[in-house]
Amino acid sequence: MKTLIEARQLHVRYGMHEVLTDISFRVGSGDFLAVVGPNGSGKTTLVKTLIGLLKPTSGSILLEGAQLSNSSRSVGYLPQKSSYTDPRFPATVREVVKTGLKHRIDQHHEQISRVLKLLQINHLADKRVGKLSGGQQQRVHLARALVGRPSLLVLDEPTGALDPHTRECFYTTLQKHNQEHGVTIIIVTHDSHAIGQYARSILFLDRKVLFFGTMEEFNQTPSSSHYFNHAHDEGAAEC
Amino acid sequence: MLTEMLQYTFMQRALVSGVFIALSSAGLGVFLVLRRFSMIGEGLAHSGFAAVAVGLLLGISPMLAAIPILMLLSLWILELGEKTTIYGETAIGMVSSLSLAAGVLLASLSGGFDVDLFSYLFGSILAITGLEVRLSVVLSVLVLGALVYFYHDLFSITYDEEFARVSGIRTHAINRLLIMLTALTVALGIRVVGTLLISSLIIFPAVTALQISSGFRSTIFIACTTAVISVVIGIFASFFLNLPTGAAIVMVNFLLFSLAFAAGRVTGR
């Protein structure tokens, strides 16, 4: 599998506090990678570094063999809390999805309509985003991430606010994009069911890489269940 | 009576410059209000008093003096908020009160000015000069042009700055552009409604539009329409009822906001 994105000896530090230590891994084109780990393990910091929102203290990231630049359009991003748009914000679905495109002029009507139809939200095109349900908003922001036809889609805990049915639909849509359109997916999630069902690779993080490999390799690891319990225990301890 | 009124040169000048400044301040206002930047407009407006004092001291048009001064102050506010431990709102308060104090000191040290400083606090669009009309039209067109050209980037960072950065938009530069355009618009608005009321031209039309619009483009369209209506009615009211123009414009703005607020409640927005 051709490498799409590669992290080389990444270190990220906030002041004196090292959040990520010596992170190295490669994600192949068309892969579906789940990034898991306990709260405070640096998952969000890692994805933000991968997409250029944070600069690593040292180390480098290569996207399609080249240094990651901010002008790169081949990355789609679905941030945390993307299902909580302020209901007072006056933006229609179509206007929001259009921000996923680079060009300023109105020549992408067809491209926007296609992605809205694909995500089954074309009937909401002229509705105000903030007035939609959490699941619908999530689809709108997924449409925004996909409309520019990215080769890499990065999602940061996208399903936290969704009910089980909407969550299942959401993952099915992701899987369809991964399998039929070849979009490489990196997803941060606590959802062990989804990881087991949809991910092909897994990166277990706790400030450093504890495990990186395929799901088969992970399941053969004697301590695989320990990792998940560890993640859940850490999460529960903070409640 | 209306035809007679429009034959006066000062009325023609007031209407032309007022409409252009209303369009640019309202268009900009939508981005500022939604980005929670509207207080920068307020802070810069207060700083405008210092700029007026400098202009009068140097014997040049206060509007001309205000443009570079407010642009520099706007960048200073942004830098203080971003690169120091000072909160953004605190930086606005510091810079605006400092420049207001500097304006008062300048006015005092110069032994007072020949012109009425009061007119710059509350506006005097009916006394606008030919040079100021040309300046306000050209610079308003510049602001509107920038808003149209950078619309996609401005909308993207207003809706979701983090996503905009990932998409390759230079958010740092666009934020600076937005603040500089605000400084320019505040400088232009000093003549229309004065330094103490200019933020109303930026904030009111945007907030009025937000009560009844659904999309972003329609919000900008309604804000611009509201601003033009309030400036035109305000100038007419000022002429016929002998009212201070700046205050009349603000009152019409408030009236339009109240109507939109009621309409928004009725339609359930």
Image: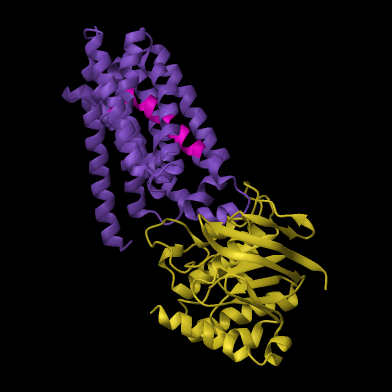
Chain colours: A yellow, B purple
Against B232, residue B65 (above or below) is: above
Which residue sits at x=46%, y=64%? A129
Specify the quadrant that holds the N terminus of chain A: bottom right
Asked if residue B190 is among those painted magenta in the image, a careful observer would answer yes
- Give the magenta range: B176-195
A90 or B33, which lies in front?
B33
A122 or A25, which lies in front?
A25
Which residue sits at x=63%, y=50%? B168
Left or right? Give the position of A207 relative to B232: right
Residue B27 visible in the picture? yes
Asked if residue A173 is among those painted magenta in the image, a careful observer would answer no
Left or right? Give the position of A35 relative to A238: right
Prevailing SS of the magenta stretch: helix
A64 or A209, which lies in front?
A209
Residue A116, image quadrant:
bottom right
- Marks counted in the figure total 0
Specify the quadrant that holds the C terminus of chain A: bottom left
Residue B233, x across and y down, in percent: 27, 32
Residue A35, x across and y down, in percent: 61, 75
Residue B98, x across and y down, in percent: 29, 28
Residue A119 visible in the picture? no
Residue most toward the front? A16
Residue A143, x across and y down, in percent: 59, 66
Against A93, residue B70 (above or below) is: above
Against A40, residue A14 (above or below) is: above
Residue most toward the right? A1
B62 or B149, which lies in front?
B62
Which residue sits at x=29%, y=18%? B126
